[in-house]
Image (cartoon, grey):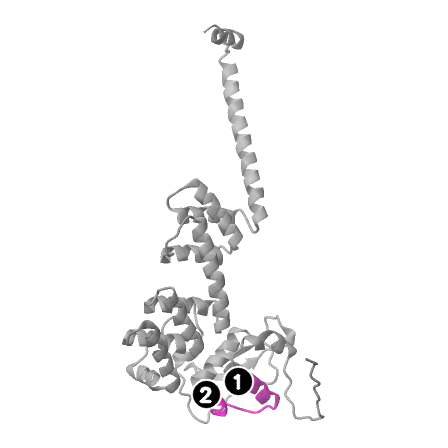
């Protein structure tokens, strides 16, 4: 197929989009996130005011959809949000992508102020900065009722009930509201989240919530990212279990070990498997704990690559041999100090 010819007529009323945004950010964003970001560029370029409610009406979204999109771009560090004392969004600063990476936020135009033509209905819990502890907001019965009656969010509950094979309890509804409302998961991502957990025969809402929080910590915002992460993680865990001679389903405690090795200690899979291989040769019991001990020592020794392991073990063997030689020399000196007659001792051994 021949390439397209693209013609551009002369005109002055235009909005400039960074090539870096197109090359690096656009492909991972969903429809709502793209529309809202482009609209912000348009409004700032023309120095026009807007508001969350105005953007929501413009694209037929809810205000929460707009806030989720803004927080998505904030996570990707191409804008920052400013709040009033009630945690309502009052300003946005867009970063100049052509000057990244820099620590300073450089606005493309003057600070954008939102028109307060009507009070925002966005809950303060929605727009708070997410923290790793994920301090869950308290949802009232009115919140739950509104969530269940909303056409879009009712779809999430229907999907969850189909996967879990039961009517959801109020606790389960609250958890799904938390995932959608606070963690900012889209309907598609929640759909895949539940499908993924149920596929692992994990239907407990607490397990689903834990997976969702893990994904949120890893800034996973699309189904594609979740699938890529799940595929890599499942393969890595399977390889580790196999190397340790385990064939059963991995436990929560063992998952904690794996996360520690990859996230906290920062080891790649080949180094973890090398530790597992040494563990399998050394012990039949407590293999995860034994592997953990090896990896902690390797971390302290500055291991970064697999080649570093061979160098460390060679140095260890050299030190061990030196210590053994010193021990033998020490014993030899003791023999000399005791004035043994080695010729007589040899003759005595031969005569017996």
Placement of 310 over or under 242, stated as above or below:
above
Q: Quadrant of residue 78 in the image?
A: bottom right
Q: Which mark is residue 222?
A: none
- Tell me where residue 338 appears, x and y as whole percent: 48, 13
Q: Residues within 10 Å of mark 1 (few under 14, many from 20)?
A: many
Q: Residues within 10 Å of mark 2 (few under 14, many from 20)?
A: some
Instruction: Return the residue nearer the eye: 236 or 216.
Output: 236
- SS at mark 2 in the image: loop
Instruction: Return the residue nearer the eye: 26 or 2.
Output: 2
- SS at mark 1 in the image: helix
Q: Quadrant of residue 188 in the image?
A: bottom left
- Tell me where residue 298 appears, x and y as whole percent: 51, 47
Q: Marks 1 and 2, how far apart in space?
A: 10 Å
Q: Are marks 1 and 2 in contact (CB under 8 Å)?
A: yes
Q: Is residue 43 magenta?
A: yes
The quadrant of the image that shows the N terminus is bottom right
Placement of 61 over or under 76, stated as above or below:
below
First to last magenta residue range:
38-62
The quadrant of the image that shows the C terminus is top left
Residue 221 visible in the displayed image: no
**What secondary structure predominates along the stretch shown in magenta?**
helix
What residue appears at the point 48 percent right and 45 percent down from the top-left corner? Answer: 277
What residue appears at the point 50 percent right and 88 percent down from the top-left corner? Answer: 114
The residue that mark 1 highlights is 36
The residue that mark 2 highlights is 61
Circle nearer the N terminus (1, 2) = 1
- Tell me where residue 340 appears, x and y as whole percent: 50, 11
């Amino acid at each position: 197929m021949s390439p397209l010819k693209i013609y551009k007529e002369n005109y002055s009323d235009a909005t400039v989009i960074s090539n870096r945004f197109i090359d690096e950010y656009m492909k991972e964003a969903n429809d709502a996130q793209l529309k809202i970001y482009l609209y912000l560029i348009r409004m700032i370029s023309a120095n026009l005011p807007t508001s969350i409610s105005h953007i929501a009406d413009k694209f037929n979204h809810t205000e929460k959809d707009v806030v989720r999109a803004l927080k998505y771009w904030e996570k990707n560090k191409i804008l920052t949000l400013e709040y009033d004392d009630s945690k309502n969004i009052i300003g946005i600063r867009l970063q100049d992508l052509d000057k990244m990476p820099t620590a300073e936020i450089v606005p493309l135009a003057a600070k954008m102020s939102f028109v307060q033509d009507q009070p925002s209905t966005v809950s303060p819990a929605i727009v708070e900065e997410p923290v790793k502890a994920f301090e869950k907001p308290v949802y009232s019965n009115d919140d739950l009722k509104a969530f269940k009656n909303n056409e879009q969010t009712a779809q999430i509950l229907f999907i969850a009930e189909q996967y879990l094979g039961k009517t959801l309890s109020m606790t389960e509804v609250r958890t799904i509201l938390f995932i959608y409302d606070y963690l900012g998961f889209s309907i598609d991502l929640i759909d895949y989240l539940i499908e993924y957990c149920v596929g692992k025969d994990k239907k407990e809402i607490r397990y689903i919530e834990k997976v969702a929080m893990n994904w949120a910590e890893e800034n996973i915002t699309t189904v594609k990212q979740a699938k890529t992460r799940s595929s890599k993680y499942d393969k890595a865990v399977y390889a580790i279990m196999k190397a340790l001679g385990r064939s059963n389903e991995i436990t929560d405690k063992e998952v904690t070990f794996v996360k520690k090795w990859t996230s906290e200690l920062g080891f790649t899979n080949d180094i973890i498997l090398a530790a597992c291989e040494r563990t399998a040769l050394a012990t039949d019991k407590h293999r995860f704990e034994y592997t953990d001990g090896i990896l902690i020592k390797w971390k302290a020794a500055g291991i970064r690559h697999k080649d570093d392991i061979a160098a460390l073990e060679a140095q260890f063997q050299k030190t061990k041999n030196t210590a053994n030689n010193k021990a033998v020399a020490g014993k030899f000196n003791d023999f000399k100090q005791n004035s043994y007659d080695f010729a007589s001792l040899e003759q005595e051994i031969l005569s017996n």
